[in-house]
Amino acid sequence: MREDSVAHKNKISLIVLMFLLISVLIVCDEKSTEPQDTIPPATINTLHLIKFDNNSVTLGWNAPGDDGLTGRASKYDLRFSIDSLTEVNWSNANIVSGLLSPSNPGSNEVKTITGLTDDPVYCFGIKTMDKADNWSGLSNIVLIECDDIIPPSPIIDLYIFHSDNESVTVGWSSSGDDSNSGTASYYDIRYDTEIINNQNWSSTNQFENEPSPQIAGTQELFQISKLPKDTTFFIALKVVDGSGNWSELSNVISIRINSIDNISPSRITDLSLLNITTNAVTLSWTSPGDDSTNGYASYYDIRYNTDSITDINWEQSEIVHNTIVPQQSGMEENIQVNDLSELTTYYFGIRSTDESGNTSEISKILKITTFGAGAISWITTYGGNEIDLANSVIVDSYGNIVIAGKTNSFGAGGYDVYVIKTDQDGNLIWENTFGGAEEDYGVDIVEADDGGYTIAGVTNSFGDNPSNVILINTDFNGYVDWTKIHGTSYSIYGLYGFDKRYNGGYLLSGMYARSTGYYIMTDINGNIQHINTFIGSNCTDQSRTYYGQGRGFEIENLSNNYFIHSYYIYSWDMWGHTGCGMPTEYTNINVYNAYGTRIWGANIGIACGDIVIEETSDNGILIRTSCWSYGSALRKFDLEGNLIWEKSWDYSIIDIVSGTGVNYFLSEYGNGFVIHKVNNNGEILENIIYENDDFPIEPKKIAIAKDENLIITGYQDSENDSTQVVLIKINRNF
């Protein structure tokens, strides 16, 4: 019985064993019929440098999938080597330990590698494995040059390539690893609802899946699709090279994914010229809006061509790379365009694009011809939104340029004396106003012996009379040291001449009480030492009463410490008739010694105006007059009063400045000016003409810069019926 029981149990065990064996065979057979996983993870092409210092590197990349970009991969293998990393030497490269398992596809992965040495170049690469042990290809290689200190150039042409109701594609030209050479490591592209700048960069939002940089100069594109609609975002980027050198911030643009936006920015109609040189121009315009004239446009497309720009040749025209973030509609914009050719005519135009990719019509086309290398170096303007005028300019001992005139854009009220100081390149150092509630203006300016400046002008705000002469002495920085007000029992009618005496005092010339010419000599502090007056005779002739009158004109100190003064005298009745034996206005010049004693004089005509006097480098005295009796004439005297030569001179002359062996005559010409280069014999050597039909220039004075080139000041019409002080530098070898 016991044996039968044991046999029965053995039989049952055998049956169970056979059943299990059959089950295993069935399972194995089923497994053999399942398809094998042969799809590897996608090759990573987003490996990039996040941070680099002497001993560690932080890398980032986007996670691939198990099968391509689908599913979750199983393992990363990150390695590095010195100088190069390829499939050939992959097995010999250094393995980075401590890697986490891959995240979901598209996730940002980060790994910091420490313990690096001072090898000059490290090469990093990564592979991914799935659960079936399929390996991806080798990623893009990140090269880290430990001794590379040259950053990539900033992106300056970020723009909207395409926009619709679902996404915006932005584009730019790639920069390089070192400036504009080679290939950078990665882009950091950011967005925010506020304008992005260097101060808020770290707090802005970084996009995912940014493209890897291509070789310098390649067109890059990046599609943005996951931002909220109907919201304006600002976009900017920086570029990082393999050594962790960061570029400067790119130009900033704004984008907006709208539900529906078919309204383009308005056409720019006031494109105009602000400044021009031999190889650059500065353009100005008023910002349009996003939708017609409302809001903000996204960016400007500025182009130029040597042929007139039209819709047909717009795409073939040269692009001006710019970093301008358009301002709110109605604001002034300007840009300098460089690298132009001299003596070349260019046509400029602008289109504006909004966040939705709607583009305006081409702006007003601006035609500009650059100057030759020997012509105008630069032009710049100063002032506000009202009337600003220049009357005089000097170059001080340090080469700074100082202008005197008047303004009603700034100051206490009415017109005020306006003084502007710039460096030798026209960059503003300071500007100041002097005056009261009435009209005050500066006529001329000189450098004082104490290193400051003395301005002569006329004031209606201060003094005992409605109109008085004012002297204002400032220090080097424009702060007032003293003022002096000079008048008589009658109002000053005009101040027409001013200069510094040999001893640091001052000379003034003009007219007071509408009848009497004068000159005044002061000491170094502006106190009057001597006054001389000039007036015609009072008389009665054939029952008519004639009243003597006089007027002082230009006054100038001479190199021998004498000074020359020009004036005229006449006798008129109340109807403007002349009498008392005086045919009309006698115009004279007198030369005085340092104490005011007359040394010699000459009558230079009848009814002369526009008197300009300048001592030449060979100690002659040039006098240009426009007279009723003799017409326009140019004379040269020596310092003793001997006439050296005289000749007819039909050009009007506003001012003369003398250089070494040559003189420069400034005259009005059309909507600008002409400069005649004249030798000491009165022969014209050459001319330069400048005109501006859009914004005419009224020239006033000419001076010689410290580098012996020429400085011209005056005033220029600008928009909205305003007038600004203009300053121009011209190469003397024009």
Image (cartoon, rainbow, N blue to C red):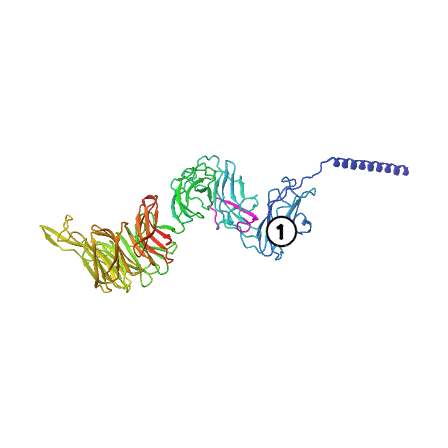
Residue 134 as seen in the image, left or right of residue 435: right
Q: Secondary structure at mark 1?
A: strand
Image location (x, y in percent) of residue 242: 58, 51
Q: Is residue 403 left or right of residue 209?
A: left
Residue at image coords 90%, 38%: 3
- Give the labeled residue for mark 1: 123
Q: Amino acid at mark 1?
A: Cys
Please identify the quadrant where the N terminus is shown: top right
Left or right: 403, with 118 as reference point? left
Q: Quadrant of residue 616?
A: bottom left
**Front one among 464 and 395:** 395
Does residue 332 appear in this view? no
Residue 732 is inside the magenta segment: no
Q: Is residue 441 visible?
A: yes
**Residue range (magenta):** 176-198
Q: Residues within 10 Å of mark 1 (few under 14, many from 20)?
A: some
Residue 186 lies left or right of residue 262; in this view the side is right
Magenta stretch prevailing secondary structure: loop
